[in-house]
Image (cartoon, rainbow, N blue to C red):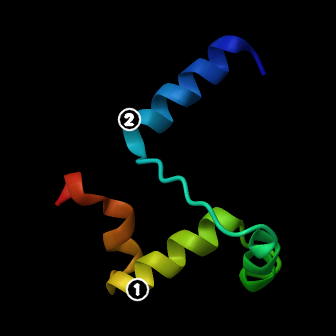
Amino acid sequence: MGKTSTTAKDRWNRNNYDTILIRVPKGRKADIERAAGDGQSLNGYIADTLRQSIGMSKEEWKAGADDK
């Protein structure tokens, strides 16, 4: 992948996503990955858990606050 492609993807991500960094105690990442199960990314699992915790549908979650 070229530098231009990476730059374009980075710009798109900055414009369309908020970034949240979380820190967990050493060894807990593996526990969370096991909870996510096969076929689901760690990011997807955490986002799904947060979405359900706030009581949003997948459509509401994907729409984002700016689209309301």
Compared to residue 45, the image places residue 12 above or below, namely above
- Which quadrant holds residue 32? bottom right
> x, y percentage for residue 9?
57, 29
Compared to residue 13, the image places residue 38 above or below, namely below
Compared to residue 29, the image places residue 5 above or below, namely above
Near-viewer residue (58 or 51):
51
In the image, is 61 to the left or to the right of 36?
Answer: left
SS for dot 2: helix
In the image, is 42 to the left or to the right of 44?
Answer: right
SS for dot 1: helix
Image quarter (top left, top right, bottom left or bottom right) of the N terminus: top right
Q: Residue at x 57, y 72 (%)?
A: 46
Q: In the image, what residue type sits under mark 1?
A: Ser
Q: Residue at x 48, y 53 (%)?
A: 20
> x, y percentage for residue 30?
82, 73
Q: Residue at x 71, y 66 (%)?
A: 41
Near-viewer residue (34 or 62):
34
In the image, is 22 to the left or to the right of 62?
Answer: right
Q: Where residue 29 is drawn, which disc sits there?
A: none
Cβ–Cβ under 8 Å for marks 2 and 1: no
Earlier in the chain: of badge 2 and badge 1, it is 2
Image quarter (top left, top right, bottom left or bottom right) of the C terminus: bottom left
Q: Residue at x 42, y 77 (%)?
A: 51
Few, some or many residues within 10 Å of mark 1 (<14, 14–19, 20+): few
Q: Mark 1 sits on what residue? A: 53
Compared to residue 13, the image places residue 1 above or below, namely above
Q: Where residue 15 is drawn, which disc sits there?
A: 2
Q: In the image, what residue type sits under mark 2?
A: Asn
Between tags 2 and 1, which lies in front? 1
